[in-house]
Amino acid sequence: MSNEDDKWAKAVRLRGEVLNSFGQIELAVVGALLWAAARPDSELTTIPSLSSQRLKALRGILADGGALAKRSGGIAPLLDRLEDFRELRNFLAHGMLRIPDLSERPGLRDRAMVEFHFIRSDRRTVESGHYFFDLDDYESLLGDLAELADRLTAALPVLNPSIADASGVV
C-alpha cells in the first residue's frame, strides 16, 4: 500500500469515528428532547430537524428552571464544549475529503495532511471553505470529541430515563 493509500485509509477511518461520535451525541440529544416533549409540563411541541436547533432546544429546556433543569447538573458545560466542534462537524458531515498535493509546499511536504472542501449556500450567498488537518492532530481531536460524546451521553440519562443503561442510571 502506498503512502497516499495509507493517508486515505487513515483519513476515512478517522472521519467515520468522528461522525460516529456526533451520531452518538445526536441520538442522546434527540432522546432527551423526545422525553421532554412527552412530559405534560413541556412547552416543546416538535423536535427540530437540524442539530444546531436541537441543541438550542435542549439548552432552552435546561434554562427554563423547571423539573428538567433541576435534574440536568453538568450538561450545560458539555454543550458549551460541543459548540467548539460545530464547524468541524459541518465539514466532515458535508464536505468532500481529499489528500492535497503538497509537493510544492516544502514546509508541509512530509506531513500527513487531509483536506475537506465544503460549499455552503442559502438563498442569497454561496460560500466555499477548506478545512486542512494534519492526521496526527485529527487523531487527537477525535479523542477529545469521543470523550465529550461519552460524557454527554452519560449525563443525558439524567434527563432521559428511557435511554439509561442497564446500570439503572436515571
Image (spheres, grey):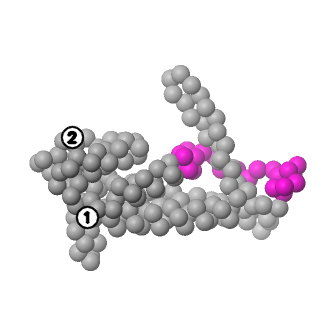
Marks 2 and 1 close (CB-CB < 8 Å): no
* Residue identified by numbered label 2: 45
Q: Residue furthest bottom?
A: 167
The N terminus lies in which quarter of the figure?
bottom right
Residue 162 in view: no
> What's the distance in space between the residues labelled 2 and 1, CA to CA?
21 Å
159 lies above or below 56:
below
The C terminus lies in which quarter of the figure?
bottom left
Residue at position x 17%, y 55% from top?
67
> Of tags 2 and 1, which is closer to the observer?
1
- The residue lying toward the viewer, choosing from 106 and 126, is 106
Examine the structure image and report whether residue 69 is included in the region drawn in magenta. no
Q: Position of residue 53 (x, y in %)?
A: 37, 41
Q: Position of residue 128 (x, y in %)?
A: 64, 35
Element assignment for label 2: loop
* Residue identified by numbered label 1: 158
Q: Which residues are magenta?
A: 87-109
The amino acid at mark 2 is Thr
Residue at position x 70%, y 59% from top?
134
- The residue lying toward the viewer, choosing from 74 and 3, is 74
Residue at position x 18%, y 42% from top?
43
